[in-house]
Image (spheres, rainbow, N blue to C red):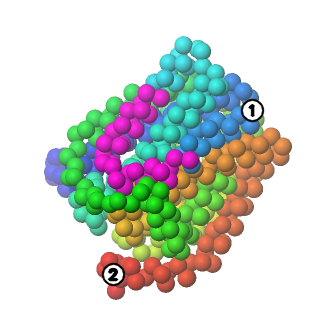
């Protein structure tokens, strides 16, 4: 069999058989690498300029607090707007933000207040971009049964970039400086914008309504928090985002003060978390059905929690890298698993609002976790702060596991109606 025949014989994952999703996958894959480079370069630059754990928490808070404020309203609007156009606009604005940061860094005039302003701006853009992208995925696949596969591929794409981006960022920071990470990120947005413009999207039917925006906002909250399975998923993610994901702003301290490394060490630690997350995403791609995700969602915060405890206790690089693998694995199993579950059961006319709340449970809650983690690290040290976060994640997993039998009984009729179980 020649090479061409072998290539043709390779079976694509179901979601990638859809042209629009392939364009989305290619553009986002390139852009997300740049995004992760900017995240690593930003926390390194802030720590370099301030030498303050508290300031790391402040910048993390500033970048995500607009998301908490705007997300509920963004979800209401996204259910009424053309999601495709929303994403094109948000990607253009995000490109402007990255290029502005690159300009400031390359000219040598960058300081903390400028980073705070640009981080706030990016957070406001993310408030519309993140739920729009989540709600847009079902419009990209031609068959509804491919949706779970598309969400899993999204997670693998996100975490493949999380693997590559930080490693490249660490090497670039060590050799030519953080400014080039921002520049590459800004340029990478061109790929996703071109991919979006090349798509052929069928107009989505939006039922006319006289309901006021605030009433639709209330409807979304009642729908999400009135159904215990959705409520439990949202609250568990919020808890893990607050207590567990705050470790990301403290990683520069571990890289320099505890492991006695430099920007390369920071890149390796972030990349190790990406390896674990990428592995989890690949596992989710291979799953045939959404059935059984509840148990996986229940144990994943515990996996992350044990990884955080081990990371906080470690004083050698090789062990810290292994622990970060478990941190990344645990988080992506919960985040992508919960996403898949919600996208499967929610009504399409409420999808934007539910996904805005899901995004808020992550991006909206984590700034407070970053702020608390930065403050705690100043008084009890970064290792103890991370260990405490790990313990909270394990307790959250235990509480969710206790609720799981009751939640399964509520979901079973929905699965039967969809034909997922007999």
Does the stretch in magenta take in 77? yes
State which tag comes first along the sequence, 1 or 2: 1
Q: Which residue, given by chain and number where applicable, does mark 2 sit on?
A: 417
- Is residue 178 placed above or below 414 in the rendered structure? above
The one nearer the camera, 117 or 207, is 207
Which residue does the image show at 63% across and 65% down from the upper left?
302
Which residue does the image show at 39% across and 70% down from the upper left?
345
Residue 325, given in percent of the width and then of the height, sits at 58, 52
Which residue does the image show at 33% across and 81% down from the upper left?
417
Q: Which residue, given by chain and number where applicable, does mark 1 sit on?
A: 52
Residue range in magenta is 69-97
Mark 1 surroundings: few (<14), some (14-19) or many (≥20) residues within 10 A? some
Does the stretch in magenta take in 114? no
Tell me if 147 is positioned left or right of 375 in this view: left
Residue 93, given in percent of the width and then of the height, sits at 42, 32
Residue 85 makes an appearance in the image? yes
The residue furthest bottom is 422
The one nearer the camera, 85 or 321, is 85
Which residue does the image show at 79% across and 50% down from the upper left?
384
Residue 157, given in percent of the width and then of the height, sits at 40, 48
Residue 259, given in percent of the width and then of the height, sits at 72, 38
Mark 2 surroundings: few (<14), some (14-19) or many (≥20) residues within 10 A? few
């Amino acid at each position: 069999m020649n090479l061409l025949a072998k290539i043709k014989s390779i079976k694509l994952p179901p979601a990638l058989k859809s042209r629009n999703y392939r364009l989305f996958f290619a553009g986002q894959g390139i852009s997300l690498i740049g995004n992760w480079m900017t995240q690593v370069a930003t926390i390194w630059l802030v720590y370099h300029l301030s030498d303050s754990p508290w300031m790391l928490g402040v910048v993390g808070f500033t970048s995500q607090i607009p998301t908490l404020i705007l997300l509920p309203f963004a979800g209401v609007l996204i259910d009424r707007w053309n999601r495709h156009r929303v994403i094109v606009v948000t990607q253009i604005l995000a490109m402007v933000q990255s290029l502005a940061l690159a300009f400031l860094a390359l000219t040598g005039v960058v300081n903390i207040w400028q980073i705070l302003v640009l981080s706030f701006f990016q957070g406001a853009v993310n408030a519309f971009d993140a739920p729009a992208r989540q709600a847009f995925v079902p419009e990209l696949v031609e068959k509804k049964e491919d949706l779970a596969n598309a969400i899993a591929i999204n997670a693998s794409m996100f975490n493949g970039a999380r693997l590559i981006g930080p490693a490249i960022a660490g090497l670039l920071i060590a050799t030519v400086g953080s400014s080039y990470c921002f520049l590459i990120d800004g340029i990478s947005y061109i790929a996703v914008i071109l991919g979006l413009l090349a798509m052929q999207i069928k107009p989505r039917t939006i039922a006319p309504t006289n309901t006021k925006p605030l009433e639709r906002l209330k409807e979304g909250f009642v729908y999400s928090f009135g159904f215990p399975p959705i409520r439990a998923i949202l609250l568990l993610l919020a808890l893990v985002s607050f207590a567990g994901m705050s470790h990301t702003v403290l990683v520069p301290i571990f890289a320099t003060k505890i492991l006695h490394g430099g920007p390369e060490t920071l890149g390796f630690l972030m990349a190790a978390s990406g390896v674990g997350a990428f592995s989890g995403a690949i596992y989710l791609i291979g799953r045939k059905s959404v059935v059984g995700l509840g148990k996986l969602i229940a144990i994943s915060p515990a996996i992350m929690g044990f990884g955080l405890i081990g990371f906080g206790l470690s004083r050698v690089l090789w062990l810290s890298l292994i622990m970060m693998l478990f941190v990344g694995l645990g988080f992506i199993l919960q985040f992508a698993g919960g996403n898949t579950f919600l996208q499967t059961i929610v009504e399409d006319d409420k999808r934007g609002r539910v996904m805005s709340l899901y995004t808020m449970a992550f991006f909206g809650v984590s700034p407070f976790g970053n702020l608390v983690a930065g403050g705690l690290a100043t008084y009890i040290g970064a290792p103890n702060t991370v260990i405490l976060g790990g313990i909270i994640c394990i307790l959250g997993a235990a509480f969710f596991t206790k609720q799981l039998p009751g939640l399964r009984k509520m979901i079973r009729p929905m699965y039967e109606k969809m034909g997922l179980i007999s």
